[in-house]
Image (spheres, grey):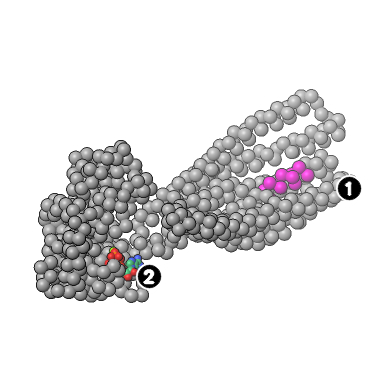
Amino acid sequence: MSFVIKLRWFFKERWKYYVLAISLMICVNLLATIPPKMIGNTIDQIRSGNLTASSLSQTVLLLVGLSLLLYVFTYVWITTLFGNSALVEKVLRGRLLAHLTKMTPAFFQRNSTGQLMALATNDVLAIGQTSGYGVMTLVHTLVGASVVIITMISLISFKLMIAALIPLPFLALVISKLGQKVRIRFLAAQASFGQMNDHALESISGIRVIRSYVQEDHDLVAFDKVTSEVMNKNKRVSMLNALFQPLTSLIVGLSYSIGIGYGSYMVFHDEITLGQLISFNIYLGMLIWPMISFGEFINVLQRGSASADRLDTALTQKADIVDVDAPIAVSVPERIEMQGLTFTYPTANHPSLVNVSFQLKRGQTLGIVGRTGSGKSTLLKQLLRQFPIEPGKLLVSGVPIERIALDQVKRWVAYVPQEHLLLSKSIRDNVALGKHDASPEEIARAIEMASFTQDIEQMPEGLVTIVGENGVMLSGGQKQRLAIARALLIDSEILLLDDSLSAVDARTESRILQHIRKERAGRTTLISTHRLSAVSHANWILVLDEGRIVEEGTHEELMLFGGWYREQWERQQMEASLEE
Ligand code: ATP
Ligand code: MG
């Protein structure tokens, strides 16, 4: 039942198709009762010597015509019903992806990629099967069985029917018990399928690391364990599946014995004719399929609803960050301000930012430096609104950021993350990710600003070179500059550079920074870095340590202050001069 409730929207939308398919199935079932009756009649005619050539040929013609009609009807209902299956799969996959794009990092920490892939493949498939094949088996069972039973009663004998169907309730009982087991085992199988996905993903994407540490065999053994687990769990499901059919045959066999035994007795006592007995046994045979269908239906339904539950759990997880009811419109981010912001990651027990305050006017540059793990990336990420924060501590133009529409904030910000992410598309498409319709001139300009032009000239196919999965074809510095070009192309109000120049040499870095300063005059930039020369020009510099601001000021002030900043600066300058 929960399956129907969860897919209510779909059945509502497609009810016409279901009505068509089900009506045709009912017609097919009704029409299929005619031939046995005709056969029984003919036999009785033979016995009584009333059979004529014309009545025989009439019967044969009717039978042929009926088969043709059944053929057409069956074709139409099958394509209609299974078309629905394909459609529900398509729609659900679309919904899942749309949902995932709205989710924040916390969601992806809770749900691994492999499990999400399992949802999009196996689970969606199981749901599709239930809404096509499942419906078919259900209708077959209900209509098939009731049509046959009514015909038996009306044309032959109520007593015989009751006697022959005595074993059926047992069948129903056992099947429903089995069904519950199927559900439990199927859930376990799907979960381990997700784990297998995770493992495969990691092995493939981490193949270089695995090879360089000569861990192939170890990884294979581990993978073997996961796949065995999946196999065993699926075996446990199919062991149950295999029980359904023999069970049905057993019960139907019992029915047959009763039908033949008691039926013959009735023929002897002239309660029914021989023809009626034969018809009756053909009808009994026709009950096999609805019975098997019933088993299949329970089986498919249990799997479909298990999958629907799994999918539902993912789809009902709300984004941690949603728009407030009445967002305040801010046209331009004139000022960015933190007022004593303390921030703890949802999964952490220590805060990663403690009482951080600063103020940045439009057009200014903020530098963020500090030891590794001091909270630089965390500070930048606050402007991406990925995690819930204390209200009223981060303000844009004096308005708390959580009161501004999410889309608005996202439109302001261009972000170059510390771990760049490239798509396996061409360089051009990677750069134009945020602005698909950018003109060739705009793209060339962004690439020039990122000092990436020369590299592209040397590539086999220039701009249309495909960079491979996550940019495997590019060097670390090239990936970084591509990511910068991507951010510069959208010409945003706020630019966040998270250690984005760590893999390029100092000279290239200063050239890129110069371009950025010139091009982005009047707009705001936040730079986190380990190389202090990248922020020495900034209007304000924060030095973080364990999430706290320990020093702050302009480059000159910090040099005068003579703390961590000055010490680092001098060391880096010395290293640079030694290198030269
Ligand atoms: P680096 O210079 O190495 O890039 P960073 O200054 O950018 O370091 P952050 O990435 O901001 O440091 O991390 C600050 C602290 O927050 C670290 O102690 C880190 O372990 C923790 N942290 C970072 N990301 C998460 C997360 N998603 N969940 C929980 N803790 C996190
Ligand atoms: Mg960082």
Q: Residue at x 32, y 47 (%)?
A: 474
In the image, residue 302 lies at what x, y percent?
58, 57
Circles 2, 1 touching at the beta carbon (< 8 Å): no
Q: Is residue 201 left or right of residue 78?
A: left
Above or below, comparing residue 166 to residue 270 in the picture: below
Q: Quadrant of residue 523?
A: bottom left
Q: Where residue 277 sits in the image (x, y, percent)?
A: 81, 43
Q: Is residue 207 above or below residue 548?
A: above
Task: Tell which tag, 2 or 1, sits nearer the viewer.
Answer: 2
Residue under label 1: 269
Residue 488: give x, y in percent of width and height: 21, 50
**Which residue is pictured at 77% across the width and 35% down the height?**
39
Q: Is mark 2 within 8 Å of ligand 1?
A: yes
- Tell me which segment is drawn in magenta: 281-291
Seen at 82% across and 29% down, the residue is 51
Residue 395 versus residue 121 in the image, above or below: below
**Badge 2 density bin: few <14, some 14–19, many ≥20, Cα 10 Å:** few
Instruction: Name which residue type carries label 1.
Output: His
User: Disc 2 designates what residue?
Assistant: 347
Residue 448 percent location from the top left of the image: 19, 45
Determine the CA span between mark 2 and mark 1: 81 Å
